Every structure is written in C-alpha cells, then in structure tokens.
Image (spheres, rainbow, N blue to C red):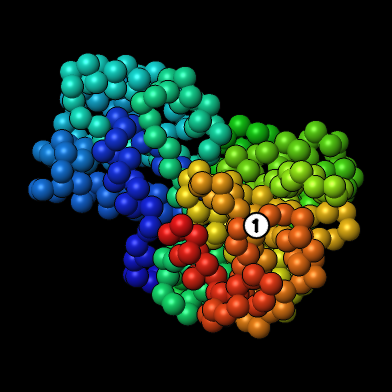
Amino acid sequence: MNSRFVPRLLATRLVEYLRLFPAVALLGPRQVGKTTLARNIADALCAPGGGGHGGPGGSGKALYLDLENPAHLDRLSDAAGYLETVRDRLVILDEIHRTPELFPVLRGIVDERIRRGEPSGQFLLLGSASMDLLRQTSESLAGRIGYLELAPIDVREVRRGEAMDLWARGGFPRSFLAPNERAGALWRENFVRTYLERDIPELGPRIPAVTLRRFWTMLAHSQGGLWNGAQLARSLAVDGKTVARYLDLLADLLLVRRLPSFHANVRKRLVKSPKVYIRDSGLVHALLRLGSADEALGHPVAGPSWEGFAVETLIRAAPEEAQASFYRTATGAEIDLLLEMPGGRLWAVEIKRSSAPAVSRGLRTALEDVPADRAFLVHGGDDRYPKGGGVEALGLREMAEEVASS
C-alpha cells in the first residue's frame, strides 16, 4: 500500500465547525477517509496549544469509539454516565447512524454542558449515510450541530499532472493510492461488492444485491444522462416507484448525484428531468469492468465519465450557498453546468475531455437564452485562453480554483 498521505481541503472547515458547534457531523461514503481526517484533526486540536478544551485543544487526547466494534459499543451501555467521565475530551463516534438511540442522550449532554458554559467541539460524529443521519439528528440536535460532507479526493488535493490518474481510479484514497492499476481495480470491485452484500442490507433496505448491482451498472452506462425511471423500471421488471426508491437509496448513501434542471424564464421548451451521475468516476469504471485508464479511455463512457468527474469537482469547490443545475432545451441548446454563485452571479460551464476543444453550437445558443455573467469551457489540458463570444477555456484544476476563490 502506498504510504502517501493526501491532505484534505475540508480540514480547515472541520476545525472551524468544531470551534462553532457542540457537535459536528462529518458525512461521506464508506472508505472516503472520514476516520483518518477526524483523527488527524483531533490530534492537532488536542495537542498542547491546539486551542480549546479537550475538544479543540485542552487536556487529554481525543476519544475514538467505533460503533461497529462490540467492545466500544459496550462502553455506551450507560452512555450518559460514561460520556460524563470523559467530558474534557473530544469524543469521536464513528458510524453514528447505526445507533440512533444515542442522539437523545447526546442532546441532553450537550444542553447541560451549554448551561455550564463549556466550549464547543465536544462530539465529532462520523456517518456513512446522509439522510439517515439527518433524520435522526434533525429533532434531537437541531441548533446544536453542524454538518460537513467529505467527498472523494479531488484534483485540488493531488499533484499537478495527476488529474487523469484520479479520473481513471476515482478519489477513494485506497483506490487512488493503490500501488498499481490492477490493485486499484480490485479494491473498487470489492468496495462495490461490500456495499451491495453488507452495508446496504445492514442499513435496512431489503433489495437483492444482484438487482441493485444491475441498476447501479445501468446508471454507469448512462452516466450523466437524463433520468428515465420508466425505462429503467422496464429493464429491471419492477415498477416506477421501486426504481425511484433505488435511486433515492444510492443518493442517500452519497454515491449518486441528481443534478436538477435550471428553471429559466425563457420561451423555450426546457428539459425538466434531472441528470444522474455516479459521483465517483472510479466507481463508474468499476461497474463497467474497466480496470485501467486505457480501457476507460477506449470506452464510450469516457466523455460522460469525465463530465461527471468535472461536475463533481466544481460543485465541491463552489461556496456552500451556490446552487448547481444544468440547462437543456428540447432543441438541443445545452449548458453542462450552471453555478448560481453568491451575489446572484451566474456561471455557465461546458465540459470537454479533449485538450483542444471547440465551443459547441448548443452552448452558443444556450448562452443567448441564459444571462450568464461568465462562461467557461473546461477541458482536459492545462492552458487558459479565450474562445471568443465571452467564453474562456481552461483546465479543470484551474477552474476549480477559480470557483473556490469566488
């Protein structure tokens, strides 16, 4: 295994949240690096001069409890009593969504500590399912908790020149940092299998693994395509509500993104169905049995996969309050990604894998309909140059940095 450590950009915001909120929930799919990030941050904050109490800086190291570990879980049989004994330490509770009965207990502890004037940064909750965790905490810890999502590694977190490797392998650390392409492909295949055969059933839904794999693979084949539930339902021999439930499940597990259509006040017939992307390009390639960069580049999914990779990168880079969508008319005018930025600014982005792309006629037409403040053509190279008509071409990393600094 490659011993290289990839610093995560979310670390700064995680520290900020721990100083603002009594509890912070760090969400993300399994194996994305939540535990590593949490422990690194805890070690830094709890070191001498870290800046807080036993949470952000104070006496004692952070306490890590894995709620899948029976020994750790047993300590919480009297959760209120046990957590009172470690009140001067930041407590990290991993896989918190598996123990919803803890949330009312945490609420009581947090409220009591607030009354006593104790500082923030008491609990760091790690979870692998977004909506499941949100439902459990929405009432119990409302107003007391901040939420952050850790996504797979993106291009701003790797070395320059590694974007194509990151696209081919995806951003899960053990896949991207595997010693060779075959090892990375094997890891991704086992990741998919484990989700289907263990993780999803343990979260509750009783869906045959073979059926859900077929559905997930169909989404990979149609990466970035418009959602057509009726067609997928026919292919799987289920009804439309069932296939919508499958999509909801993968979205709740932070594995799939539904990109909504942009609602513009134009006299055009607009496409209203969302686009659907598998959020990690490496998983797209794993589901399609593409084990190497060459195999992925030679497959028809290469363009849509790169588009999804870029869309995910730019949405992550955008400010929290930014809204993402796409624009498409029935006649083919299209903008791959629209970012409604703070202050009412609208950025239009077309995405091409080629390093020498042309601006499509569909984008030119769409820009006549949509009053974008800036328009970009994101390509697979590194050069930045004007394309005419107010469109600027630039590489994905530079575009992500432009979005992040806006």
Whether residue 299 sits left or right of residue 46 in the image: it is right
Q: Quadrant of residue 292?
A: bottom right
Q: Quadrant of residue 367?
A: bottom right
> What kind of element bears circle 1?
loop
Residue 145: percent from left, percent from top: 38, 30
Residue identified by numbered label 1: 372
Residue 314: percent from left, percent from top: 55, 59
* Mark 1 surroundings: few (<14), some (14-19) or many (≥20) residues within 10 A: some
Q: Nearer the viewer, residue 4 or 50?
A: 50
Q: Residue at x 64, y 70 (%)?
A: 390
Q: Is residue 347 visible?
A: yes
Residue 223: percent from left, percent from top: 72, 59
Which quarter of the figure is the N terminus placed in? bottom left
Q: Residue at x 72, y 36 (%)?
A: 245
How many numbered circles are shown?
Answer: 1
Whether residue 81 sits left or right of residue 371 in the image: it is left
Q: Residue at x 39, y 18 (%)?
A: 104
Q: Quadrant of residue 300?
A: bottom right
Q: Amino acid at mark 1?
A: Ala
Position of residue 228 relative to residue 74, above or below, is: below
Q: Nearer the viewer, residue 120 or 2?
A: 120
Q: Nearer the viewer, residue 254 or 398?
A: 398
Q: Is residue 193 visible?
A: no
